[in-house]
Amino acid sequence: SKKEEPVKEEVKQEEVKKEEVKKDYVVGAFFAITGKFASLLGEPERNTVEMMVKQVNEAGGINGHKLVVHMEDTQGDNSRAVKAAKKFIGMGVCAIVGPSRSGSSMAVIPVVQKAKIPLISCAAAESIVVPVAERKYIFKTPQKDSDAVRKIYGRLNKKGVTDVGIITGTTGFGNAGRGQLKTLAGEYKINIVADETYSPADTDMTAQLVKIKNAGAKAVINWSIVPAQSIVPKNMKQLKMDIPLYQSHGFGNIKYAKLAGDAAEGIMFPGGRLLVAKQLIHHHPQRPLLMKYKEDYESTYNEDASTFGGHAYDALLIVINALKAVGDDPEKIRDHIETQNFFGTGGNFKFTPEDHNGLNTRAFDMITVSFGEFKILGEW
Amino acid sequence: MVIRDYIFLGIFLLVMACVPLLLKNDYYISIFVFASFNCLACIGLSLLLGYAGQISLGHAAFIGIGAYTSGYLTTQFAWSPWITMFIGVVISIIIAIAVGVPSLKLRGHYLAMATLGFGAILYIVAVAAVDITGGPAGLNNIPPLNLFGLILDSDKKFFFFSWSVVVIGLLFALNLINSRVGRGLRALHGSEDAANSIGINTSSYKIQIFIFSAVFSSIAGSLYAHYVTYIDPGPFGIMHSVLLMTMVAVGGMHKIWGAVIGSLLLSLLPEFLSFSTGYFKTFGIEYKPDYDTLVYGIILLSIMLFLPEGLYGGFSSAFRAVKNIVKRNGKKAKSSS
Amino acid sequence: MLRLVNVNSYYGLVHVLKNVSLHVNKGETVTLIGANGAGKSTTLRLISGLQSVKGGEVTFEGKDISRISAEKLVKLGIAHVPENRQIFRPMTVIENLELGGYLLYKENGKKELGKTIDEMFARFPILKERENQLAGTLSGGEQQMLAIAMALMCRPRLLLLDEPSMGLAPLIVKEIFNIINELKDQGDLTVLLVEQNANAALKIADRGYVMETGKIIIEEDAEALMKNQEVKRAYLGHDKREMWEK
Amino acid sequence: MEITNQDFSNLLQYIFMGIQRGSIYALAAMGFNIIYNSTGVINFAQGEFVVYGGLMMVSLTMTMNLPVPVAFFFTVLFVMLIGILMERLTINTVKSPTVLRLVIITIGVSIFLEGIAMVSWGKNSHVLRHFSSSETFEVFGAMILPQTLWIIGILVFIALGFILFFNYTMTGKCMRACSINRDAARLVGINDRKMVMISFALSAGIGAIAGIIITPIIQMDYGRGTMLAIKGFGAAVVGGLGNSVGAIFAGILIGIIEAFGAGYISSHYMDAIALFFMLIVLFVKPSGIFGSSEASKLKEF
Amino acid sequence: MVETILEYQELQKNFGGVVAVNKLNMTVDIGSITSIIGPNGAGKTTIFNLTTGFLSPTAGNIKFFGNSINQLKPHNIASLGIARTFQNVQVFDNMSVLENIMVGRHLRSKSGILSSTIIPPFLRKEEKHIKREAEKWLEFIGMADDSQISAGSLPLGKQRMLEIARALAMEPKLILFDEPASGLNARETLAIGELIGKIKESGVTVVLVEHDMELIMDISDIVAVINFGTRIAMGTPAEIQINEDVITAYLGD
Ligand SMILES: Nc1ncnc2c1ncn2[C@@H]1O[C@H](COP(=O)(O)OP(=O)(O)OP(=O)(O)O)[C@@H](O)[C@H]1O
Ligand SMILES: Nc1ncnc2c1ncn2[C@@H]1O[C@H](COP(=O)(O)OP(=O)(O)OP(=O)(O)O)[C@@H](O)[C@H]1O
Ligand SMILES: [Mg+2]
Ligand SMILES: [Mg+2]
C-alpha cells in the first residue's frame, strides 16, 4: 500500500529479484542517538547494530533471509520513543531492540505489550522487566542494578567499610540506582551517611562532595550514566578527598574515564567483561565473543568499544538467535527468548519465564581504572 | 470577519475527520495524536501571547500538572480519569493564580524569566519528589480513558477524541476572542494605559487569561498521560515550554489559527525528517539523524526570517496574491472577450 | 540646495507620495502645510533617508541622495526632527544631547561637544534643570525642546522640522519660531518646516507648499499663500465665522 | 573550636565554588546585556558562543597543540566571526523586526549552531588543560583551583571594561541608543547596523572567553549551550537587564545561592532554590536588583 | 446653585525632587467646560494622571461628586464615569476603528470570560447591542466610513477623534481631554472644538488641557492657569486673556 515506509519500498525493489527466494526479517531498533546527555549510550548502540546487520547479511543472512533493521532516534525523548515503537509496529517488525534509556523503555512498554511484539531493552533499570507477568514481551540485556549494588556492597563488606556517601544523577538510571543502594544497604549493613544528587546538566559537584566528606563517609558511590559523572572524581581530587570512589556500571565507557583524566585513577566499578576482554583468561567462555565484538567494533568505528554497544549486541543477538530457530513470528520469538541460554557480552544469559534479564552478579567483574585503562580488580 | 473564523473551524473539522481515513498506519495517527496535545496547549498560549501580549515560558509545567495529577490519582487511588482530569484543572487554576498574580505584574523579558523560573522549579520538583511523581522513573500503568464504556485504547479512537477536544477548545477560543473579553485582551495588548482608562481591569484580565490558557495546557497534559499511559518529567521541562512558544510564533501569533498551524507543523516536522532519511538514501546522500537538529534549526529560522506574520500570515498573503492574479486574469479575459 | 523631482513613495502597497516635486534654496525657510495624512511627514522622512524612494530623484547640493542612508545624510548636514518627539526615553537628558552631538564628537572631540551642549542649555534653560532626568519623564513640551536641541547639536545646514510647535505653550512656540528665525538669520541654516500652525509657519517662511493626499497642489510665496482664499479657509483658521456658516 | 574551623572552611569552600559557578553566569549575562543594549533583544544563542569558545579552544590546544595565548586569541576571533555572521545573516536581514520575532530567530540560530557543533565536534564531552596547575591549594581549609582564580580575574577585568564602555564612552551610549529607538539613532548619525554588528561581535567574544576559561573545570560538549543561556538570562534579568554591574552581582549571587543550597539545604532542590530566589527578587523588584523600573517602563518589549 | 463634580484639595505630587503638582485647589462645575492651561511642564498632564488613577497623589485629595477617589485604580475610576484621552494618542492600533469604539463599551456590557467562551458572538444579544452603540458613536464623530480601517493607519487627526469617540462610548459623566488639538490644523481644530461643544450639550462635563488659545477662548466656560503645579489664575476666558501673570508666564505679549 501507499502508506508503506520508504525504506521498505526501497527494500522491496531490491527484493524483486530475491522475492522468490526468501522474504526479509524486519526488526526495529531505536536508541538515544542524538539526545543531550544520552548520546554516549545511543551512538555505540546504533553503530553496533549497523555493524551486526552488515555482518549477518554478508554471511548470507539468517537461514537465507536478509536481516533488515529499521533504525530510529529517540533523542532520549519518551514521546518520540512511543511514536517510533508505533512506527515499527505499523511496519510489521517481528521484534524491537532498544531503547537506550529507562524512561523511554517504560514509556513504550504498554505499546509493545499491546501489539504483542517482543522488545529487548538496552536500558538498565530493573523495573523494566518486573513484574514479569505484566511484561510478557519485555526483555532487557544490561545487568541488573541490584546486582551492581550487591557487587559494590559485597566489596565494601570485605574491606570493612560501612559508612558511605552516595551521589546519584537525577536520571532514570541514577534514580533507580539510588533506590537499590538504599534498599540493599540494610542487608549489607551499610550506613549511608549522605545521599546527594546532581542533574545531568550539572557542572560542579563540590558542594555535594563537601557534604559527603563532612558526614564522615569512608567511601563514595557515584551512580550515573551521563558524562557529568566524570566530574565527580575531578571534584574529589580538587577537594583532596582520598577515600575510594565506586562508580556504577554506567561508567562502562572508557570515554568517561578519559574525561576525568588522572582523577579517574583508582575508580572501581562493577562492569561487564567486555571492557577488560583482553585480560580475561584464555579459556574464559565469554572471551572469544568479546574479543571478536571488540575488534570488529574498534576496527569499524575507530573508537573504543563500550558496554553500551555490548548491550545492543546482546539484544540483537537474542533476536537473531530466535529468528534462526523459529523464524519471524513475534509470538514464537518471544517464547524462544524465554528459553535462551548463551554467552553474550554482558555475561551468561539464562532467560526463563520468570527472569527476563537472565543475568546475575556473576555477570560483573570489579573493574578499576589504572593508567587510563580499565583493569580487572582481582576478585576481592 | 467573525463568520470566517467559524467557517474555517468547519473546514478544519472536516479535514481532521478525514485524516484517519487517509492514514491507515497507527504510527501516523499517533503522530497526530501527539500533535493534538501541543495544539491544545498552543491555542491557550496563543490567547495569552498573541492576544493579551503576555509571554509565558512556563506552560509545559501546566501540562505536567495535568499529567501528574491524572497519573498519580488514577494509579494510586484508581479514581476515574475524568475526575482526575478535573482535579488537574483545579490544581492548575490554583497554581496559575499563585504564579500569575505576582508574575503578571512584570513585563517583557522579566515576565519571560519569571515564568521560565516557575516552569523549571516545577520540573525539578517532578524529578526530586520521588515518592509522589516517581522521580525520573516516572509513573506507569496509567489507565486509558473510558468514554461511556468505550475504552480509548487505540490510536484511532484516541485520535477522534483528542481532536474533538481540540476543536472544542478552538471553538471556545474563537468565541472568546470575538467577544467583549477578547477585545479587552487585545486592547490591553495595544495600550495598557488606554485599556485601563476605559475601565478594563487589565491586571485581572491578564490573570484570567493566564488561568484560561493554563487550563488548556492542563487538559492537554491529562490527555497525554492517559494516552501514553506512562509519564516522567522529561516532556514537561522548560525546553518544551520554549517549543510551545516557538510553535505559536512560527504559526503566526496574532491569530488562533497560527497556533494550530504552528503546532501541527513543528510536531510533524521531526517525524518528517526521520521519515525522509530513507529518501536521502535512495538518492545516495548519506543523511544521518544527527543532522535533524540542524535541519530543524534551519527550517525554524527560515520561517521566522521570511514570514514576519508566521505561517498563517504567509498563507494568507499567498492566498491574497493568488486571488489577485485570478482577478486580474479574470478581468483580462473579460476585456479581451 | 535641496530638490525633489517627481518623487513617489509607498507604505507597503499604499501609494502615499505621488509625483512630489519641490525645492529649497540655500538660506531659505520653506514650509510645507496640508491636512492630516497628506504626506508631509513622509516627505521629510524620505529626504532624511528613513523612508525609501520609489521613482523620482532627490538631490542635495547637486548630489543624488535618494539611495544614501539616514546616518550618512546627517554627516552631509541634514538634520531631521521627526514628529512625536523621537528621543531616547530611558536615557538622561544630557545623554540625549551627547548622542545628538555624536558626529560632532567624532569629528571635533569631547571639548567641542561639551561646548555645544552648554550652548543648548543656554538656549533651553529648562533642559539644564532637567539635565539628569530620564528623557521619557519630561513633560511633552520639554521633550520637544530636547528633540530640537538634539538636532541642532550636530550643526546642520539643512534642518527638517516636523511640527515643532506641536503641544507647546504659546510662549514657547514663539520662542521656537524665534530660534528658527535666529538660526536662519545667522545665514547658514536652511529650514524645511512642516507645520499645522500654518499661520506662524508662514510668518517666518519665505515660501510655502500646500500638500493634499500625497500631491503638492500649490506652491507660492509665503505672503501670497497667506492671502490665498483656499488656504485661508482650510489651514489658517481665519474667518471662522465664514466657516461656521458653511 | 575544631568544629567552627570546619564550618568556616566549608563556608569558604561554598563561597569559592559559588563565585566560580556564578562567574560564568555573570559572563553569560554580560553577553546578553551587550546585545540587549543595542537591540533590546535577548540572544538565546549566547550559550552557543560559550560552547564554541570552549570547543574551539579544545581543538586548538589539545589537537593542534597551539600555545594557550595564541589559541585563546584565535578562538575569540573565531567566535566573534560567528557572532558577526549570525548578525549579518539573520538579525540584519529582518525587515520588520519585533522583539519577540527576533528572540525566536535567536532560538533558531541556537538550535542550528548546536546542530553544527554536534556534527563537527561530535557528541562527546571534551576536556581542556588548566591554564596553570590543576593542583588545588588550600586557603583556611578550603580547596581552591588555580583556574578559579583565572576565572575571577578575567571576570573582573572584563566587567570593568564593560562598565566603562557602556556608561562612559560614546560608542557604548550609541549602542544603548540603538536599542531604544533605531530611527532616532540613525537621525543623529549613528550607523545602527554597525553598532548592532559590533555588539554581536563583542558579545560573542565575551561568550568565547567564558567558554575558554570554564572548560578546564566543567568539560564541554555541544549541548551545554541551552542551560548556560538560561542561567545567564536569569542572572541578566535579576541584575536588571542592560546593567553590567547588576549582571555580575546577580550572576555571582545566584552561583553562591546554588552552592549554599546544595551545601546546606539539599542538592535535590539546589536549582529550585536558586530559581525560587530569582522569582522572589523579581516579585519584589520587578525590574531586577539594579534595574530602574522607570527606565524599563519607558522601553517597549 | 451649580453642583461641583470634581474637586482638588491641596493636591500634591512629587517625583523625587520635582514637585509636579503643588498644593493645588480647584473645583469643576458640573456641565461646564473647564480648561486648564499653563506652560510646558506645569503639571497639567500630571493632574490628569492623578485624577484618573494612573498616579497616586503624594498628598491632598481628589473628590468626585464629593467622594474621595485618591486610592482607586484607573479602571475603578473609569467605572465611576471619568473618561480621558491621552496627550500622545493611544488608540489600539491592532484593531479596526469600529472595534476600538466597541472596546469603549466595556463598562456598559457584562459578559465575562466563561460566558464569552461558551456562547459564540453571533448568538449573543449583547454583542449586537455593543456594535450598534459603537456605530452610533462613530456616526457622532463623522467617521462611519472608516469603520473597518485599522486604527493604526489613520492620520493623527482621525486617531484623536477616534480616541474621543472611544471615551464617549463609555457614556462618562466627566471627560478629560489632554491636548486634543495638538498636531491638528486649523480646520480640524475647529471640528474638535465643535465636537467638544456637542459633548457639553449632551450633558457631559469637560475638562480640557490645550495650548491652542483660540480654541480655549472659544469654547471654555472657565479657564484655570497652572504654573509650577499651582494655580496662578482662574476665571472666564476674557478675564484670563488680560491677566498680567498669565501673560508673563504663558501667553507672552
Ligand atoms: N507606517 C505606516 N504604515 C501605513 N501607512 C502609513 C504609515 N505612516 C503613514 N501612513 C499613511 O501615509 C499617509 C501620509 O502620512 P504622513 O504621516 O506623511 O502625513 P502627514 O501629512 O505628516 O500627516 P500629519 O499631519 O497627521 O502628521 C497617511 O495616509 C497615513 O495614514
Ligand atoms: N514620572 C516622572 N518622573 C519625574 N518627573 C516627572 C514625571 N512625570 C512628569 N514629571 C515632571 O513633572 C512636570 C510636570 O509634567 P507634566 O507632564 O504634568 O506637564 P504638562 O503640564 O502636561 O506639560 P506639557 O504641556 O508640556 O504636556 C514636568 O517637569 C515633568 O518633567
Ligand atoms: Mg506628520
Ligand atoms: Mg502634558
Image: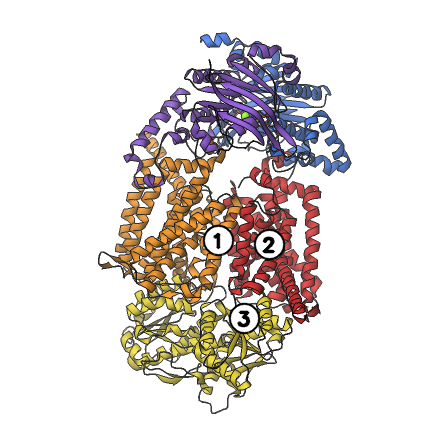
Chain colours: A yellow, B orange, C blue, D red, E purple
* Three-letter code, disc 2: Ile
Q: Chain of mark 1?
A: B
Please give the residue where the numbered disc 3 appears in the rendered image. A229
Q: As drawn, which residue projects farthest toward the bottom? A: A283
Residue nearest the observer in this picture, D63 or A169: A169
Find the distance from the CA under tag 3 to the CA under tag 2: 31 Å
Mark 1 packing: few (<14 Cα in 10 Å), some, or many (20+)?
A: many
Tag 3 secondary structure: helix
Residue nearest the observer in this picture, E231 or A351: E231
Give the left or right position of residue A350, taking residue D84 as reference: left
Q: Quadrant of the N terminus of chain A?
A: bottom left
Q: Chain of mark 3?
A: A
On the image, the x and y values in percent for residue E174 come to 46, 23
* Three-letter code, disc 1: Phe
Q: Quadrant of residue B126?
A: bottom left
Please give the residue where the numbered disc 1 appears in the rendered image. B118
Label 1 CB-ligand 2 distance < 8 A: no
Find the distance from the CA under tag 2 to the CA under tag 1: 32 Å
* Three-letter code, disc 3: Gln
Q: Are marks 2 and 1 in contact (CB under 8 Å)?
A: no
Q: Chain of mark 2?
A: D
On the image, the x and y values in percent for residue E128 come to 31, 30
Label 2 CB-ligand 1 distance < 8 A: no
Do callouts 3 and 1 point to residues on the same chain? no
Q: As drawn, which residue projects farthest toward the right? A: C111
Q: As drawn, which residue projects farthest toward the left? A: B149
Please give the residue where the numbered disc 2 appears in the rendered image. D82
Give the left or right position of residue B127, taking residue A340 as reference: right
Q: Are marks 3 and 1 in contact (CB under 8 Å)?
A: no
- Can residue A141 be seen by looking at this rendering? yes
Tag 1 secondary structure: helix
